[in-house]
Amino acid sequence: MRLSDLAYDLPEGLIAQAPAAERDGSRLLVLSRATGIVGHHVFRELPTLLRPGDLLVLNDTKVIPARLAGRWESGGSVELLLLREAEPGVWEALVKPAAKARPGRVIVLGDGGRARVAAYAGPGRRLLRFDPGSDARGLLERHGRIPLPPYIRRPGSNVPRPGSGHSAFRNPESAMDRERYQTVYAREEGAIAAPTAGLHFTEALLDAVAGAGIGVRRITLHVGPGTFQPIRAARIRDHRMEPERYVIPEATAQAVKAAKAEGRRVIAVGTTAVRTLEHSALRGGEVQAGPAEADLFITPGHRFRVVDGMVTNFHLPGSTPLVLVAALAGLERVKAAYAEAVARGYRFYSYGDAMLIL
């Protein structure tokens, strides 16, 4: 597969700028892996589209308000996207402008917080050591902003055009984004982007799923830049995924093993849940409980050991999530389904409508 195979035409007007009025009121395109037949539903119908005994696996990561604005102690503005705490008081961050982020320079943040550039950590990235009295998590809580994708445009935003990759800089969120760019079951802080397939669920819908005899279990994968890293290699297989941290609880591992042993389907909610389960199963052939880092790039030809179906959104052309969807359902069937979704006016990307692949 080549990068050019992942192109498709999308009118800019179909890029969702806000979520549906009701989370579970989004449209739901159902795609058969076996036949390619497409059906059209509303997301709240999900319990009727699954079977009793199916197991849904959700990613309960929580998006942190990871964007911080500050200034250099010597003058000039600087923008940070905190990615992860590498050790107590030291955070890996994307820094803009990166060219000025030389080790030793000091950044002044809200409430007088201070951080010093400690070391290089990759292109555009630095390790920042916060002063002992400067609590990074507290600064995020008081002054941080939600890192929206660049195609969600808000008044005052100054971000790249759609398709240019994930950028959190200069894209302020609205009050609505604080609630809606987060799943209702988010509880483990650490993501810089939402696992957007889960945005369609409500507590009532989860109750209806359970009431239909469908199991629900959780994993945690903290979505990082790797999920949004653009594919720049002409040949897809030459792309490398950046590792992302995950944890599989013992109860989830046991539930997945039981479902597979009994011939029941495992339905992952989102590409992050798919990668977590499939990466874990590489170690010994079945899902393992505990922490690890997923660097698995799922491409066509991958043998799915765990996942039988998935709930997902509509993804950017040339993106790694789109490659994963093509690996599960077949590239031509996915492109045909996307073309039908465009023709029928489905809404695309993070705040858009959903697909169910079975």
Image: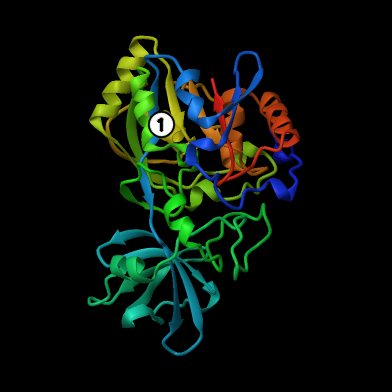
Question: Which quarter of the figure is the C terminus placed in?
Answer: top right
In this rendering, position of residue 25 left or right of residue 264: right
Classify residue 166 by image quadrant: bottom right
- Where does the image place residue 7, in percent across and percent down from the top left? 73, 40
- Where does the image place residue 190, in percent across and percent down from the top left? 35, 52
Tell me the amino acid under the disc marked 1.
Answer: Leu
- Helix, strand or loop at mark 1: helix
Q: Which residue is mark 1?
A: 205
**Residue shown at the point (33%, 34%) measured from the top left:** 218
Q: Is residue 39 above or below residue 247?
A: above
Q: Is residue 110 above or below residue 342?
A: below
The answer to whether residue 177 is visible is yes
- Where does the image place residue 326, in percent across and percent down from the top left? 62, 29
Which of these two is toward me, 233 or 288? 288
**Residue shown at the point (31%, 47%) measured from the top left:** 188
Classify residue 346 by image quadrant: top right
